């Protein structure tokens, strides 16, 4: 004997028992189909306007660095005395450069100190062996 509850019928219970997996599979199939859609615009590479007498392989050439130029005070190549004076003033009065120079000097001293400690340690070990 089947119990019946007030306000319910067998057809409602049968509908509630219907499996929901076909709807889930349909949603998954739709998602899989939509992931294959490409919504991005087609890529149009830039077109370069080149002169008629161009003889290169492409619009760009390899760089030729001027390694023979001096690496020191490059601003002196311009031959401007005001620029030279401003650069000297910058180096003399810039606290950031002074602090960085002091950090550099300290780092060199620490490295030299570590190297001397290493040498003295190896000399002590050598004297223990001999």
Image (cartoon, rainbow, N blue to C red):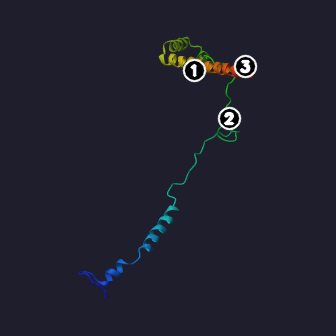
Q: Which residue is mark 1?
A: 107
Which residue is at the front of the view, 68 or 125? 125
Q: Is residue 41 above or below residue 49?
A: below
Mark 3 burial class by Cα count in 10 Å: few <14, some 14-19, many 20+: few
Give me the residue at 44% from left, 73% from top.
Answer: 21
Q: Quadrant of the N terminus?
A: bottom left
Q: Position of residue 104 (x, y in %)?
A: 56, 19
Q: Secondary structure at mark 3?
A: helix
* Mark 1 vs mark 3, CA separation in Å: 30 Å
Say whether residue 59 is left or right of residue 31.
right
Q: Between marks 3 and 2, how big is the CA–CA gap?
A: 58 Å
Which residue corresponds to the image point at 54% horizontal and 54% vertical from the top-left? 42
Query: Which circle's residue, 1 or 2, is located before the other in the chain?
Result: 2
6 vs 49, nearest the viewer = 6
The CA distance from mark 1 to mark 2 is 38 Å
- Density class for disc 2 (Cα within 10 Å; few <14, some 14-19, many ≥20) is few
**Do the CB atoms of the residues marked 1 and 2 lie less than 8 Å apart?**
no
Q: Quadrant of residue 117?
A: top right
Question: Label for residue 127?
Answer: 3
Pick whichever, 82 or 127, lies toward us: 127
Tag 2 secondary structure: loop
User: Dot 1: within a 10 Å radius of its alpha carbon, few (fewer than 14), some, or many (20 or more) residues?
Assistant: few
Secondary structure category for the residue under label 1: helix
Circle nearer the N terminus (3, 2):
2
The quadrant in which residue 6 appears is bottom left
The quarter holding residue 130 reads top right
Q: Is residue 61 above or below residue 35?
A: above
Q: Earlier in the sequence, mark 1 or mark 3?
A: 1
């Amino acid at each position: 004997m089947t119990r019946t509850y007030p306000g319910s019928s067998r057809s409602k219970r049968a509908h509630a028992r219907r499996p929901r997996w076909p709807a889930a599979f349909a949603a998954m199939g739709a998602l899989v189909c939509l992931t294959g859609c490409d919504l991005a615009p087609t890529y149009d590479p830039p077109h370069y306007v080149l002169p008629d007498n161009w003889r290169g392989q492409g619009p760009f050439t390899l760089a030729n660095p001027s390694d023979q130029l001096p690496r020191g005070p490059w601003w002196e190549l311009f031959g401007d005395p005001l620029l030279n004076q401003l650069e000297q003033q910058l180096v003399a009065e810039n606290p950031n450069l002074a602090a960085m120079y002091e950090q550099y000097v300290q780092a060199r001293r620490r490295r030299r100190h570590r190297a001397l400690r290493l040498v003295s340690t190896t000399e002590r070990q050598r004297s223990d062996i001999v």
